[in-house]
Amino acid sequence: MPAFELVADPHAYRRAASALARGRGPFAIDTERASAYRYDDRAFLVQVFRRDAGTFLIAPEGHREAVRDIFSPVLGGGEWILHAAGEDLPSLAALGLFPGSLFDTELAGRLGGFSHPNLAAMVERFLGVTLEKGHGREDWSTVPLPRSWQEYAALDVAYLNELAEAQAEYLDARGFLGFAEQEFADLVRRHRARPAPAPKTWRDIKGVTALRSPAQLQVAKHLWRARDAHARDTDTAPGRVLPNRLLVELARTQPRSAAETAHTSGFPRRRRGAAEAWSRVIRDALDADPATWPERARPASDGAPGKRAWQQFYPESWEALNAARDAISEVAATLGTEPDTLLQPAVAREVVWATHRGGGADTHAVALELSRQGARSWQVELTAAALAGALRS
């Protein structure tokens, strides 16, 4: 087990930052969060390894401003190595930490053609090391952190430098390293442009689109607002306060009494007072002026339609989308990579929708639309001709 140190106060932060500043090479970074337990997705542990410096487990809770002030001058703008960077970058940005460049070992694995490029699989495949498992779903807001959890977290960064170097050689041998560098640079750019995800609203609840009537939507909105307020006040994951599936079921059935609420499928009857509290929210929602109740969200008019509407109302265009998917799969198979890595499905959908409806299915028009939809230059180069051919057939 590589040596590591847990640092949990500003004095220890300064000592760790000084050691990391004297190290050499990229910073291997990971985070542990607790969104299944806490209100948001903030980091409760930041693991950093640098050669000639060692591994530090930074516990930021209670001292987040100090973490920003002390570590940003050292880590900020540096070369980072992460695994599945998109999962970690937002919580690191919340601490004021931004990379200058990065290498994402999960994305590198996908580009290399590995369908399951999790960290353990990549470390074993490229380094011949078997990582211990077992603590990935823990409540990382726990204080103090058990020693076994700390060891698990330290291992997440212990091999990232060697892994990135091995993957870079592998990608370079296949001619894919340039593609990977474009993807990494795009990750950094997009993260700086929008470091935090867009705030969720009640319309983002999974299953809410199945609700039809204004009354159901009104109840869903008020339940979501009450749940969000309680979750924020108590720093509890919203799903632990009221699971999405139960929220949608309560909105669908609209029970007005505590007894009816308690008998709703999936309701936690052991939670004292919960039935009365949620039934009160429902009653208040339905007692409001119906003129203020929400209506069903209208689909965006400028983007590709949903699957069902596309199939039903635009069958020729739907056939073109299937042909485009087949073309992308063929190119991906030739390259030895995954189709979804070669071109994201959402991008392919929008490109097919725009070019097929506009009648411009030549390679140049497709290439322009690919770029407009956010495809990187390597993706445009490898897929534009194949997509154009599929759309013309």
Image: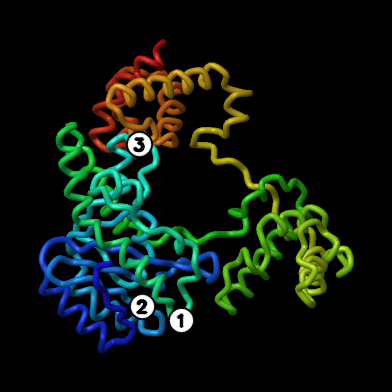
Q: Quadrant of residue 376?
A: top left
- Of badges 3 and 1, nearer the viewer stands 1
Mark 2 or 1: the one toward you: 1
Query: Based on the displayed image, in which of its 4 quarters is residue 71 positioned?
Result: bottom left
Q: Which residue is mark 1?
A: 143
Q: Say what amino acid the circle numbered 1 marks.
A: Val
The residue at the point 39 percent across, 57 percent down is 87
Q: CA distance from mark 2 to mark 1?
A: 10 Å
Q: Which class describes the residues within 10 Å of circle 3: few (<14), some (14-19), or many (20+)?
A: some
* Amino acid carrying mark 3 in the image: Thr
Residue found at x 88% / y 63% = 260
Q: Residue 59: give its label.
A: 2
Residue 113 position in % (x across, y down): 31, 34
392 sits to left or right of 279: left
Residue carrying label 3: 341
Asked if the residue at tag 1 contacts the one at tag 2, i.e. Cβ–Cβ closer than 8 Å, the answer is yes
Amino acid at dot 2:
Ala
Asked if one can make out residue 372 in the rendered structure from this viewpoint, the answer is no
x, y percentage for residue 202?
62, 58
Numbered label tally: 3
